[in-house]
Image (cartoon, grey):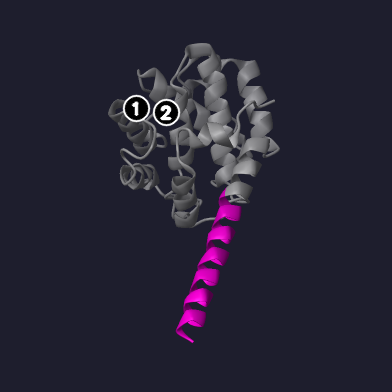
């Protein structure tokens, strides 16, 4: 069971930026194979790997939200990871990452679909976390395409693939979606009320 909360996510990526990611996403956010529930499983996979190799959890969380956020389709889109990193660049200094951590996330995003291995523990953990969710599209992960020893273990691949197959969701990601959209509705209604008050004052 996940112990993450939406507040843990906001400590790395502020809610306003999560909102921007959601708004800019061109595909199915909640029901799509590259949407927010995939991002959440990537984060969960990465944090589980990190419990074995001490990879940077903030990097994993940021990668989870940015690696697929600029996809233009659910098929062949080889530059989507690079675009995700470039989209993230707009928020340098606004996300709770050092410049070194930020740059690692950008490298991880850019290479996650077309580079097999990396000797940096944080980047390799991000890539494994994503690949361990492949069974959601019927592709069972193979150890030779993974980096970390824990990721290559048969039991671990099976465990993570079961989450992917059944498209597991988590309480924190559901809470986050509701929180971000409730804020959007509140702001929308607030703007209507402000405009209405302005009109009444003019009358």
Q: Is the stretch drawn in magenta largely helix, strand or loop?
A: helix
Left or right: where does residue 81 sit relative to residue 54? left
Quarter of the view holding residue 55: top left
The one nearer the camera, 142 or 148, is 148
**Which residue is most to the bottom?**
203
Quarter of the view holding residue 186: bottom right
195 is within the stretch colored magenta: yes
Q: Which residue is mark 2?
A: 59
At a point 40% along the width and 18% down the height, the residue shown is 121
SS for dot 1: helix
Q: Which residue is mark 1?
A: 101
Question: Magenta residues?
Answer: 180-203
Of the numbered discs 2 and 1, the one sitting upstream in the chain is 2
At a point 40% along the width and 27% down the height, the residue shown is 116
At a point 67% along the width and 32% down the height, the residue shown is 163
Q: Is residue 187 above or below residue 104?
A: below
């Amino acid at each position: 069971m996940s112990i993450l909360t939406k507040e843990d996510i906001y400590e790395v990526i502020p809610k306003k930026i999560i909102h921007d990611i959601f708004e800019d996403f061109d595909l199915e956010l909640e029901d799509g194979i590259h949407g927010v529930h995939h991002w959440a499983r990537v984060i969960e996979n990465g944090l589980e790997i990190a419990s074995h190799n001490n990879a940077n959890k903030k990097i994993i969380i940021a990668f989870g939200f940015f690696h697929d956020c600029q996809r233009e389709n659910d098929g062949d889109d080889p530059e989507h990871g690079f675009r995700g990193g470039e989209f993230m660049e707009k928020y340098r200094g606004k996300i709770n990452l050092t410049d070194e951590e930020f740059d690692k996330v950008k490298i991880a995003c850019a290479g996650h679909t077309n580079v097999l291995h990396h000797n940096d523990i944080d980047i390799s953990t991000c890539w494994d976390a994503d690949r361990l969710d492949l069974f959601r599209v019927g592709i069972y992960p193979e150890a030779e395409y993974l980096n970390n020893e824990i990721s290559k273990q048969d039991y671990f691949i099976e465990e993570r693939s079961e989450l992917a197959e059944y498209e597991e969701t988590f309480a924190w990601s559901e809470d986050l979606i509701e929180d971000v959209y409730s804020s959007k509705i509140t702001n929308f209604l607030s703007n209507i009320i402000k405009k209405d008050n302005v009109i009444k004052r003019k009358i």
